[in-house]
Structure formats: structure tokens, C-alpha cells
Amino acid sequence: MEVNNNIKLIRNNRLSREIVFADGIGSSGKGMLSQILASFERIEKQRNDMMFDTIPRFHSLGKISDDAAIVAMQTEADQQLYHTMISRDINFRFGDSTSVLNNPFPLRYFKRAFGPEGDSIIKLINDTNPILNEAPHDALKNAELFFNTFNKELKIIYILRNPIEVIHDWERRGFGHRIGTDPREFQFSYEYNNLIVPLYAMGWEDEYHSATTIDRNIMMIHYHYYKNIESYNNLSDDNKEQVMFILFDDLVGNPIPVCSQMANFLGTKKTYWTKKILKMNNCPRIINNNSLEIKYKEIISAASKEKIDILDIMIKDYEQLSNKYVIKDNT
């Protein structure tokens, strides 16, 4: 096919009207957050559609144009909403967080599988205004592109978790050595001086290959943590109003007030399923500070002095950001 860079792609026939991203760094509790959101009125079950991870990364590298990135994600949102409304490509694996068996209103999706499709579903969407529920990774880092794509349709709820917990979990899951080597790991990597490095190592490639896995994980979490916050700070005031910060500890420790805040932010309400999903996710639960101290000691026992200093700064910044961005409601 002949290449024509003069064509500007556009999608005027939009279907989705409201979208929520349950966002955060991997291991911050996004899956749980997305399941809880699905218990609210009008919000559909959790989805993890990779296009919302891959397209922004390609765009940030200059490998896809603005209009192509925007139209691709608009089309993806519309298609996945339609598929959700007819239970096409719905996950029934018991152990998966996106499974209908682990999300609210499971019978809804069983019934849809035997229901109609076509124009009647378009009418249903227009009449009921369902909210597409996606759980991408580090969407806040590319928030400007997402808001250019979805405008007022999109709201982001960003979950902050103590970096000790996140780094410890990344180390447990082997991310310090799996990216670019394990065929079951799906992060992007690239070649640098005949070596494979993850995108998260841009700017410190040589150090990445000489570092221990725990040092790698500290630095990769550092990359995500500050890129996300930097992106938020660069947003317009109007777009900042479309982002809500919550703390993992608040959500699991005192979930009902947090759920009320999130429902108000999204223009919806909790349902009888909300408490069920909270219980399924062991909420409320007591935050074990002794466990946090043990995990910190495990990390620093294997990390270099330089990376321990970086971790300590991240922990302090996490506490400051929690006070700066998270609205407290302990009622």
C-alpha cells in the first residue's frame, strides 16, 4: 500500500461516553481498585486492554503519529465497550482479576452472552451510558495524550502505594531479570550496545546490566514514580480536575469513605456489590507496619548504598505526595 502521510485520521462516530482508568504503578493495587470501581452503578467490569499501554509508549518514542495514536485508542475504547456489552471476549478464568467470576454482577455477563447484538446494543449504550473500566499501567505518565484522545470522557483514579511494597513485590515476581528474557513477560525492551534493556532503563543502560536485580527494581520504580508525578504536574488545571489520587493504605484500611469519594468523583453510586467486592479483597484490613519494616530490611540487605539512598528519598517523597494530593475523608 502506498504511504500517504498527508491523511489525517479521525473518528467522529464515537460510542463510549465515559471512561475510567484505574491507574498506578504495577503492584500498587490497580486490579483491586478496578474491581471495586466495577461495583458502582454504570461501571463495567475490569478490563486490561493492552492498546492503552502500547500505543502511548509507541507515541512517546515517535513511532506513531498524533492522529494515529488518538484514533487507534478511540476505536479501541469503542470496540471494547461494545464487546463488553455483548460479553464478547469475556474472561472466565477463575484466578484472573479480569474474570467475570472475580468481578461484580457476574450474571450480567452470562446473560449478555445469550442476548442480542447490533443496533439494539448501540441504543442500550446511548440510553444507559455505561462507563468503560480500564486498568492500564502508568497511564498518568501519558496523561496529556489520553486527555487529547478522550477529552472530558476520561477520568483517572491513581493509586499510590508505599514504594517499599512495590519494590519488594517486583523483586518477588522477578522483574529485575525477566524483562526482555522471559517470553511470558510482556514489557517492551530494546537493544543497546548488543544488550537487551527495558524501556524503563533509558538513560542508564550500562548501569542496568551491571546492577543487581534489587537495584534494577529500585531504579525502575523510581523511573515510573517520578515520571507519573511529573506528567501530572504538567497538566492543565482542567485536566488535573480529571485525576483523583488515593492511597492503597486508605483504600484497604478504611474503604467505605474512599469508595464514596470515588463514586462522587465519577458521578455514580456504590451498590450492594461494593461491600461484597471489598470483602473478596480482604478490605478492610489492618496495615501491618512490622511487615513493612521487614520488607524494607530485606531490600536494603541486597541493595547498594547508592540505591538505598534513592529508596529513602522515594519513601519521603511518597509521604509528602500523600499529604499533597490525597484528599482525606475519615467519616
Image (cartoon, grey):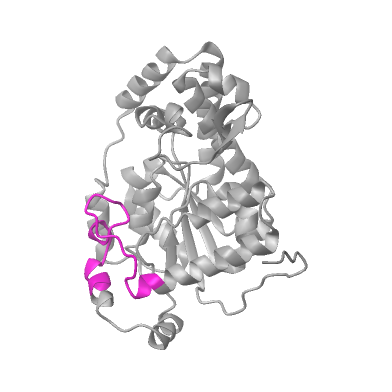
**Residue 118 visible, this angle:** yes
Q: What residue is drawn where x is 43% and y is 58%?
A: 261
Residue 155 x/y as whole percent: 53, 61
Q: For the magenta stretch, what is the residue range?
A: 83-110
Residue 153 x/y as whole percent: 55, 68
In the image, residue 91 lies in the stretch drawn in magenta: yes
Q: In which quarter of the image is residue 306?
A: top right
The answer to whether 55 appears left or right of 167 in the picture is right
Q: What residue is drawn where x is 66% and y is 46%?
A: 61
Is residue 283 depicted above or below 203 in this figure?
A: below
Q: Nearer the viewer, residue 253 or 130?
A: 130
In the image, residue 153 lies in the stretch drawn in magenta: no
Q: In which quarter of the image is the N terminus?
A: bottom right
Q: Which of 17 and 157 is in front in this view?
A: 17
Single out the residue that lies furthest toward the right.
6
Single out the residue that lies furthest toward the front.
1
Q: Nearer the viewer, residue 100 or 320?
A: 100
Q: What residue is drawn where x is 36% and y is 50%?
A: 31
The answer to whether 288 appears left or right of 2 in the picture is left
**Residue 316 visible, this angle:** no
